[in-house]
Amino acid sequence: MSRKFFVGGNWKMNGDKKSLGELIQTMNAAKVDPNVEVVCGAPSIYLDFARSHLDAKFGVAAQNCYKVPKGAFTGEISPAMIKDCGVNWVILGHSERRHVFGESDELIGQKTAHALESGLGVIACIGEKLDEREGGITEKVVFAQTKVIADNVKDWSKVVLAYEPVWAIGTGKTASPQQAQEVHDKLRAWMKTNVSEAVANSVRIIYGGSVTGGTCKELASQKDVDGFLVGGASLKPEFIEIINAKA
């Protein structure tokens, strides 16, 4: 089964209207592979700006949301608000949400369920820290994280699973194409056993962690790497090279 290549750009807490406007102009003018689904994760305050300026062929994602539609949750945004801005995706469970802001697996599962029920697509992030990889428990960690997400998903067509080894995010260290393929392959096998063979074959498992124009082609050639979640490089013109990694 062919899985449509998916490239997400996570802008994190970066940019202003000037710099993001320039980035958007570059993207709109670029020649991009039509067989790739591209989604840009904008800071919540710029979701409307990104959606109204980006070409319709690009998707937009929020970088987080809360688990209920509305209420007394100062500083939070809901899937309903995200959709009201014309935005169709949300990134959930990013390692910075887990490790900087202390979000638990349970909360990420609840957010995933509510976002999907509200009609958003979810880019669900999982990944081990350096001490966990060195301790030989990568599989245990990512399977546990994946299980909490899986328990909250009814329709897998709206979910992209992003494997991001925490030790490779923003560090310049990239998991080797072989390391990435190994984890992606094991995740697919886990899905086959714990969800279904059909979902295992169709779900897109993307890689994140210091993806650049230089590393993207070899990573993209791995059979179970279905795309990327790109951090710093998504704010630079090289993002176009990464989108076109399979071209």
Image (tube, grey):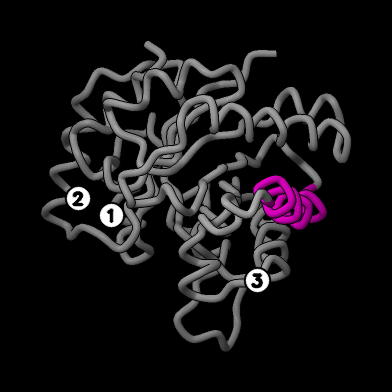
Q: CA distance from mark 2 to mark 1?
A: 9 Å
Q: Earlier in the sequence, mark 2 or mark 1?
A: 2
Which image quadrant is residue 65 in? bottom right
In the picture, the quarter occupied by the N terminus is: top right
Q: Which mark is residue 236?
A: none
Q: Earlier in the sequence, mark 3 or mark 1?
A: 1
- Does 149 appear in magenta? yes
Q: Nearer the viewer, residue 28 or 110?
A: 110
Relative to residue 31, is residue 168 drawn left or right? Answer: right
Q: Nearer the viewer, residue 47 or 98?
A: 98
Residue at the spot 17% in from the left edge and 37% down from the top edge: 25
Image coords of residue 175 (percent x, y): 46, 37
Q: Amino acid at mark 3?
A: Ser
Residue identified by numbered label 1: 49
Q: Amino acid at mark 1?
A: Phe
Which one is in front in this view, the residue at disc 3 or the one at disc 1? 3
Residue identified by numbered label 2: 20
Image coords of residue 14 (percent x, y): 25, 59
Residue at the spot 66% in from the left edge and 49% down from the top edge: 136
Q: Is residue 108 above or below residue 59?
A: below
Helix, strand or loop at label 3? It is loop
Q: CA distance from mark 3 to mark 1?
A: 31 Å
Q: Which contiguous range is marked in magenta?
A: 137-153
Helix, strand or loop at label 2? It is helix
Relative to residue 241, is residue 123 drawn left or right? Answer: right
Helix, strand or loop at label 1? It is helix
Q: Residue furthest front?
A: 135
Q: Which mark is residue 104?
A: 3
Q: Is residue 45 above or below residue 19?
A: below
